[in-house]
Amino acid sequence: MSSTPAIASDRLTKAYGKKQVVNDLTFRVNAGEVYALVGPNGAGKTTVIRLVTGLAFPTSGSVSILGEDPHKRPAVRRRLGAVVEAPAAFYPYLTGRANLRLHAALAGGVKDARIEEVLALMELKHAADRKVGVYSLGMRQRLGVAAAVLTHPEVLILDEPASGMDPLSLHLVHGVLRKAAEEGTAVLLSTHHLDEVVAYCTRVAILEEGALIDEVNLYDRRDRYRLRPTSVADAVRLLEGRPFVRHVSARGSEIVFIPRAASDLAEVTRHLGEGGVGVLEMQRDVFDLRGYYRERVHSERVRRTGTGTNGGLPRFPGEA
Amino acid sequence: MGVLLRMEFAKLWRLSSVRFGLLVLVVFPLLWAYAPGIFDVYGFFIVSAYQVPALGLLSSMQFLLPLLTAITAAELLGVEITNGTLPTVLLRPVTRPNWLAAKLVAAAVYPFIMLAVFLAASLVAGAQFGFGQFIGGTGLGDAGLLGTGVLGAGAALGELVRGYFLAAVALVPIAMLAVFLTVAFMNAAGGALATLSALIVMQLFIVFPGLEPFLLTTQLQAYSAPTADLTWAIALIALYSALFAAAAVVLFERKDF
């Protein structure tokens, strides 16, 4: 795998007049990753997407796609698939298939068979000869994803891909993006659907007022376990540095650890037992992104304004 | 570039302003051909089908044709903004100058299409007066509609084609200006309105002595100019067109979408 990140943003800043929309944003997305941008409305997610795709120009800082500046080297867009409008924008007087043919002509080197393949992939075969103007919101979004993956891109960038989608369509799109990532495509998306993020994203960047306030590695968070041992200090000492554990730390009367693989859990308990530490309770540490997100956004507002929201931001329904 | 040009010309026919504009230009000559009070108002009779096109052109070149040109040129870009397809296309390996150049070519060709339809519709509208030789003029040659004697069908048609072609050429900088102003405002209505406003203001500049030969609006009369005076008019039209087109490309290159 190349060491060049698929998408790189270095100290990216965008200002419209005196209003700073994106502020000193640095992040990397590697091949095979699904990286999500989340944040409140107006946090700058769409602007970041437009800057990264080369549709907008940064005030300062730089972006690169596969090591190339998309402004200076538009040819790099041959390796990029993107949907930057929600819903995805198409010529309404053309059919779904004709719109994809147009994309294929602009991209060059796409065979008709591939158009049929992506139509089938996004379950749009039945509507392929209908004009896009009569498509539902969800169908247009699916056609957007079909257009984005048309050229087998190495980088996929999607602004609000879940917007207007029913659960089945959403599941379909998730599957396509997950598969693309598994095949080595770097995926950058912006979304408000935190459940969607937890389900299949690798890392998530939380934006507030155009700045990156946190970057969470969901791969680690998803695979965390909480364990209540008879001795926290001994448990940490016994597990630290062991090959079957990637991370271990104390948290009150518990320890939190990440096994190298799920199959290593038995090894953890066996090792603790051999060291004389009993396991009172062990369970998966379900990461509550919604609660985490709420806290991070709230604390950032408090830090920035000195006051924050009265009583913090309201909890999400069903939040842990 | 070939793909982009094909795309733009295919889109041209779908623009509502093109459909409406061409319909107006088909109906408009009928007003002259079937006007019952033409003698009472203007003091002449139409005696040949070859006179109807000149009447149409004379009465539309100052406002109607620039209006239709400006609206369509503005809509060529504006429809992309409305549909949201502008970013969609720019995300493909297409350079901004190439994409806008295809639009500028379509906008520049449109006046020729429009004038060809207008000429054909005018001749058909005037068919009742006959297509043979006649005593008088087409209105676009020497001595206007009165002419200098008997005018053959071939000569009459030649005068009309020359006049209509020059009229289309004179409309090209207006199309370029409309594209440029639409890029500036990122709005079709704003672009078309600003173009017409600029033309109206420019017409007022004739009050400044010596300025009139340089005005874009003066070149709109090129269709009736003697051949000897055409070099200056064509040079100015080309200069205006190139300047507006270049300004549109430069501005478009720097726009955020």
Image (cartoon, helix red, strand yellow):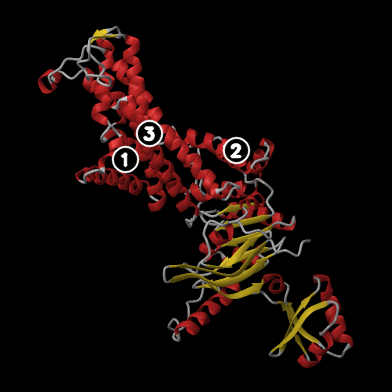
Above/below status of A54 relative to A20? above
Q: Is residue B70 left or right of residue A185?
A: left
Q: Secondary structure at mark 2?
A: helix
Percent coordinates x, y for residue A296 in the rendering: 55, 78
Percent coordinates x, y for residue A270 in the rendering: 87, 81
Q: Secondary structure at mark 1?
A: helix
Provide the residue designation for mark 2: A101
User: Which one is in front, A97 or A222?
Assistant: A97
Provide the residue designation for mark 3: B234
Above/below status of B18 relative to A291? above
**In the picture, residue A123 is in which quadrant?**
top right
**In the picture, residue B62 is in which quadrant?**
top left
- Decide: few, some or many residues near mark 3? Use Cα within 10 Å; few <14, some 14-19, many ≥20: some
- Residue at image x 52%, y 77%? A297
Kindly report which numbered mark, 1 or 2, lies closer to the viewer in this rendering. 1
User: Which one is in front, B213 or A308?
Assistant: B213
Please, what is the three-letter code of the amino acid marked with disc 2?
Arg
Q: Quarter of the image containing the N terminus of chain A?
A: bottom right
Please, what is the three-letter code of the amino acid marked with disc 1?
Leu
**Chain of the residue under the numbered disc 1 shown in the image:** B
Q: Is residue B213 left or right of residue A107?
A: left
Are discs 1 and 2 both within one chain? no
**Chain of the residue under the numbered disc 3 shown in the image:** B
Are discs 2 and 3 both within one chain? no
- Decide: few, some or many residues near mark 2? Use Cα within 10 Å; few <14, some 14-19, many ≥20: some
Provide the residue designation for mark 1: B216
How far apart are the alpha carbons under marks 2 and 3? 40 Å
**Chain of the residue under the numbered disc 2 shown in the image:** A
Percent coordinates x, y for residue B69 in the rendering: 35, 36
How far apart are the alpha carbons under marks 1 and 3? 11 Å
